[in-house]
Image: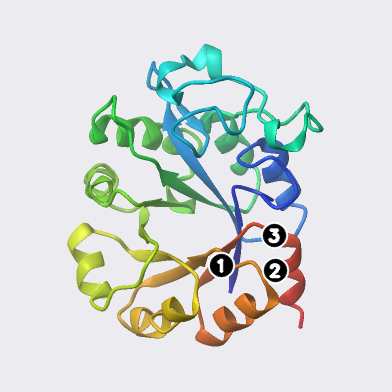
Amino acid sequence: MEIIGHRGFKRQYPENTMLSFKKAAEYPIDGIECDVHFSSDSVPFIIHDQTVDRTTYKSGNVNTFSAKELIHLRADKEYDRRYPDAVIPSLEELCAWIAATNLTLHLELKQQVHVKAGVFADGCLAVLRKHGLVERTVISTFYHSYIAEVKRRQPTISTALLTKTPFRRGGKYAEKVQADGIHIRHGVQSSMYYRPWMKQGLTVRAYNCKTKADFSRCRRSGLTGVITDDPALMTSLLKL
């Protein structure tokens, strides 16, 4: 079962920073998950929220900052300034690092209101191609219409629809939106769908996997992988 660091090592380090990604990679994980937004000048940056307010010391929507303003904006606000090197990276910086590892990149496309979906897809794919990461990347999103835009431009790339709740006809819907897999919020109810979806040929990964009990339930189901805030815990459980 794959272990994927959710925003890096989110439980202990500032999320979506190179520090968090590199700390996660100190454990035998399979991949890194992160989120991408465009700057005002259409450069992809790694940050979860639509605004910079929660994680940085600035305020405002990500899409109102230029790449020059965002690059290396300090992002340890939730950690009381303990990590001065924890800054917002560009997708370019992240991909340059990923390319030198054996990790898979799980890139979540966040909704962009200031650019068309195709422009967003083009910008992200250009960086992936530059670093030879198309075959090592899974594009995921809650905005399922984005998946078709990605597949139209890069048919070989792996995709996954994101959902918080399960639904019965997973295979048919995934085919409709051109998703190769489903990434779903883990829970007792959700876990009942893992095997049926995988029997339909889908890759299925669960996020919000936090405890030993979560891990055990996912492992018993034969799940493709878990996306976790605590890669240290989850990789240790693989040995049991």
Q: Earlier in the sequence, mark 1 or mark 2?
A: 1
Spatial CA span between label 3 and label 1: 11 Å
Residue 228, image x, y percentages: 61, 61
**Mark 2 belongs to which amino acid?**
Met
Rendered residue at 71%/52% (across/down): 24
Horizontally, is 133 left or right of 215 in the view? left
Q: How is the image coloured?
A: rainbow
Label annotation for residue 230: 3
Asked if labels 2 and 1 touch by Cβ distance under 8 angstroms, the answer is: yes
Q: Assess disc 2: are there few (<14), some (14-19) or many (≥20) residues with their C-alpha within 10 Å of its C-alpha.
A: many
SS at circle 2:
helix
Residue receiving disc 1? 226
Label annotation for residue 234: 2
Residue 128, image x, y percentages: 45, 38
**Mark 3 belongs to which amino acid?**
Asp
SS at circle 1:
strand
Q: Assess disc 3: are there few (<14), some (14-19) or many (≥20) residues with their C-alpha within 10 Å of its C-alpha.
A: many
Q: Residue furthest bottom?
A: 220
| Visible residue check, residue 8 | yes
From what the image shows, is residue 27 above or below residue 98? Answer: below
